[in-house]
Image (cartoon, rainbow, N blue to C red):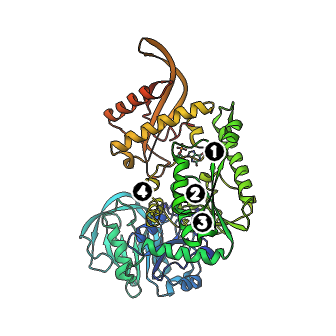
Amino acid sequence: MNSPNKTSPSISTTVNPSTVSDVAQESVLVLDFGGQTAQLIARRVREQNVFCQLVRHDLSAARIRELNPRGLILSGGPASVYEAGAPHPDPAIFELGIPILGICYGMNLACRSQGCDVQPGKSREFGRTPCHVESDNDLFRGVPKEFIVWMSHGDQVQNLTDRFVPIASTDDCPNAAVKHRTKPLFGLQFHPEVTHTQHGGTLLKNFVQNICGCRGTWHMSSFIEQQVAEMRQRVGNSRVICGLSGGVDSSVVAALLSRAIGSQLSCIFVDNGLMRDGEVESVRENFGKHFKTDLHVVDAQERFLSELAGVSEPQQKRKIIGRVFIEVFRKEAESIPDAHFLAQGTLYPDVIESGAAADGPAATIKAHHNVGGLPAELGFELIEPLRDLFKDEVRAMGLELGLPDDMIWRHPFPGPGLAVRCLGEVRPERLEKLRRVDTIVIDELRQAGLYRKIQQAFAVLLPVQSVGVMGDYRTYDDVVAIRAVQTEDFMTADWYPVPHDVLGKMSTRITNSVRGVNRVVYDISSTPPSTIEWE
Ligand code: XMP
């Protein structure tokens, strides 16, 4: 997504060349020029059963030849190709004979590398735009002559020379899609990866199948087999520690490792006393009984609760929980001999968030806060088998590995657990009250068939008492809030309109069965301005 007015970006994504895996015989690489939707391209290609990874924009042509991908996609990006310091690929990639698709900034780069002019257009094109297909070609096979595309650019390829032919246009952009006359080189000024572009999936499918010749044989099962083989080789005879949080990501990592190295895996689950009802049992059931891993459940409830006693300030609570978690985890890990590796459930969005500079050394990975942010001083080598995957792909992997549905679809739960939902001081009896309310909320959502439609739902115990009446008595009891949100990225979220009758059932069950709660309120705030959690 380029702009003629912006200065060159520092690109904040991608896999370092040394960590690119030679995952599949049939793969496509996306060279990342910093576009906001670059990661979506990789995912859309994987949806076509072709393995795809994002790599640094300046990966050398020699390394690309070694990796032997069937195709390359140059992503969009915020820079302008004619600016000083704008990111460029190794020019030799255009001579490799590997099919290339340039998207937006990537198209401008590809065309400019072949002698075309790229300049600011008469006006910026942004949003949904009608597009006309100009000629039959392999990229647009099965796409209607007129369809809507998503544009987000200021620059345009102005002069195609005699090397390219235009294959699609919009009112403001005569060269909305181009094809090289002799090389397998295509450019799209619009973004096929976003859902606003109609037939975008078909375009990418055409590229990987018709132009790159991929057969689409990649499946999650092949990825699992590849990861299993890689991990066995890397780990050798050592032992791997995996911190379990009860959530999806760490569970999938543990299940994968269990398949790869079986008895060489030790899982540590720290019971901090801040878990929801049934969570500790479910970890025991899945990892102790089902996968038969060497499971260490550390009962640290008293330790956490005594350190939290008297503390109300949210950040202070988080700090205490983080520190104690590391201390407890370290002590347990030290009791496990021969452990050299620590496995973490870092996902692709975490890699992006880590802001790994494309021209820096190896990508620095954000500590996975769901296991408390384990510091490098623990001295382990990291294993991160999910770092190329998106959340829904991790779920697919978990199902393939035999994890139960309810674990796979569990709503995310913050590392500090119920402590940040028990506003004010965290005391055992307050936690117990909250746990019981939370169980009712989730149970009613499940019964109403809403649990999977909502990405996160929970109860919050407020540090507020209100007056009520029960029988003939005045009460002065706690207030709980119910929160349910819909979100794609957990950075923005909308409050979910849970039907009144469902809210009514929750409220009645809560006030009838949880002693000390006489009022239930529903949170109708979106994120922003509110956050998802209350603390
Ligand atoms: P907020 O409240 O920031 O939450 O809108 C966004 C997402 O992050 C989760 N969250 C946390 N997860 N440690 C975590 O592991 C934390 O301290 C923490 N705070 C919030 C939250 O549940 C939501 O999914």
Spatial CA distance of label 2 from label 4 is: 28 Å
SS assignment at label 3: loop
Res. 500 image quadrant? top left
The answer to whether the residues at label 3 and label 1 have Cβ atoms under 8 Å apart is no
Of the residues shown, which amino acid type is indicated by label 3? Glu
Residue 380 against residue 18 in the figure, above or below: above
Residue 353, numbered circle: 2
How busy is the neighbourhood of tag 3: few (under 14 within 10 Å), some, or many (20 plus)? some
Spatial CA distance of label 4 from label 3 is: 23 Å
Front tag of 3 and 1: 1
Question: Residue 269: x, y in percent?
Answer: 62, 53
Q: Which residue is mark 4?
A: 405
SS assignment at label 1: loop
Q: Residue at x 60, y 66 (%)?
A: 384
Horizontal placement of 174 versus 97: left or right?
A: left
Whether residue 220 appears in this view of the structure is: yes
Q: Nearer the viewer, residue 331 or 203?
A: 331
The answer to whether the residues at label 4 and label 3 have Cβ atoms under 8 Å apart is no
Residue 275 against residue 517 in the figure, above or below: below
The answer to whether the residues at label 3 and label 2 have Cβ atoms under 8 Å apart is no
Distance from mark 3 CB to nearest ligand 1 atom below 8 Å = no
Question: Quick one: label 4 or label 3, which is nearer the N terminus?
Answer: 3
Q: Which residue is mark 1?
A: 272
SS assignment at label 4: helix
How busy is the neighbourhood of tag 2: few (under 14 within 10 Å), some, or many (20 plus)? few
Front tag of 3 and 2: 3
Q: Residue at x 53, y 42 (%)?
A: 276
How busy is the neighbourhood of tag 1: few (under 14 within 10 Å), some, or many (20 plus)? many
